[in-house]
Image (cartoon, rainbow, N blue to C red):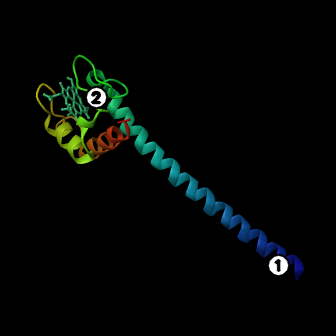
Amino acid sequence: MKKFIAFGLTSILMALTLFATGGCSSASQQTASSASGKGLYDSNCAGCHGATGAGSAAGTPLNAENAGDVKQVSDITRNGKGSMPGFARKLKDDQIQAIAKYVSTLPK
Ligand code: HEC
């Protein structure tokens, strides 16, 4: 009987460990989605706005106050602004959202 209880406890512990591992893997998925925002930014925006959003001769700084919130960044990314082309045809909506979220994490 004691052995049986010990076995029961072991399975509960194993189940808890599996559960904890499951929690970890969903956290790393979140990291992956912000990484893809970064990847999309690096390939579509960094050429003009700089790798860290500091700007260049071809684009304004995005880490300054002027980048705005996630909605404003996604609107500008979709439609373009001044000499910046819109990305509505090139990027899907969820990609634009991912970029806008990434831009909002750049240091202000
Ligand atoms: C060809 C160069 C170029 C590329 C590529 C580009 N931008 Fe821009 N972007 C600009 C320029 C120039 C402005 C300033 C437009 C103005 O105010 O007339 C601007 C403005 C902005 C603004 C508004 C901030 C401000 O200073 O007015 C945001 C936000 C922005 N870009 C985000 C992005 C994102 C996100 C991407 C990638 C999907 C991107 N841009 C790609 C050139 C570029």
Seen from the viewer's position, the closer of residues 82 and 65 is 65
- Of discs 2 and 1, which sits in the foreground? 2
Q: Please tell me whether residue 1 is drawn above or below residue 11 in the rendered image.
A: below
Q: x, y percentage for residue 60?
A: 23, 26
Res 98 quadrant in image: top left
Q: Residues within 10 Å of mark 1 (few under 14, many from 20)?
A: few
Is the residue at mark 2 in contact range of ligand 1, meaning its CB lies under 8 Å from it?
Answer: yes
Residue at the spot x=36%, y=39% of the render?
37
Residue 45: percent from left, percent from top: 28, 28
Label 1 residue near ligand 1, CB within 8 Å: no
Q: Where is residue 99 in the image (x, y as percent from the top left)?
A: 31, 39
Q: Label 2: which residue? A: 44
* Residue at the image point whose x is 26% and y is 45% from the top: 69
Residue type at tag 1: Ile
Decide which of tag 2 and tag 1 comes sooner along the chain. 1
Q: Quadrant of the C terminus?
A: top left
Q: Position of residue 107 (x, y in %)?
A: 38, 35
Residue at the far bottom in the pictured view: 1
Q: Is mark 2 on a helix, strand or loop?
A: helix
Q: How far apart are marks 2 and 1 (CA)?
A: 59 Å
- Foreground: 102 or 4? 102
Q: Residues within 10 Å of mark 2 (few under 14, many from 20)?
A: some
Which amino acid type corresponds to the residue marked 2 in the rendered image?
A: Asn
Is residue 22 shown left or right of residue 1? left
Asked if the residue under mark 1 is in contact with the one under mark 2, i.e. CB atoms within 8 Å, the reply is no
Quadrant that contains the N terminus: bottom right
Q: Point out the residue furthest to the top here.
A: 57
Residue 61 numbered tag: none
Q: Mark 1 points at which residue?
A: 5
Q: State the image quarter where residue 3 is shown.
A: bottom right
Left or right? Give the position of 78 relative to 3: left
Does 24 sit left or right of 68 as displayed? right
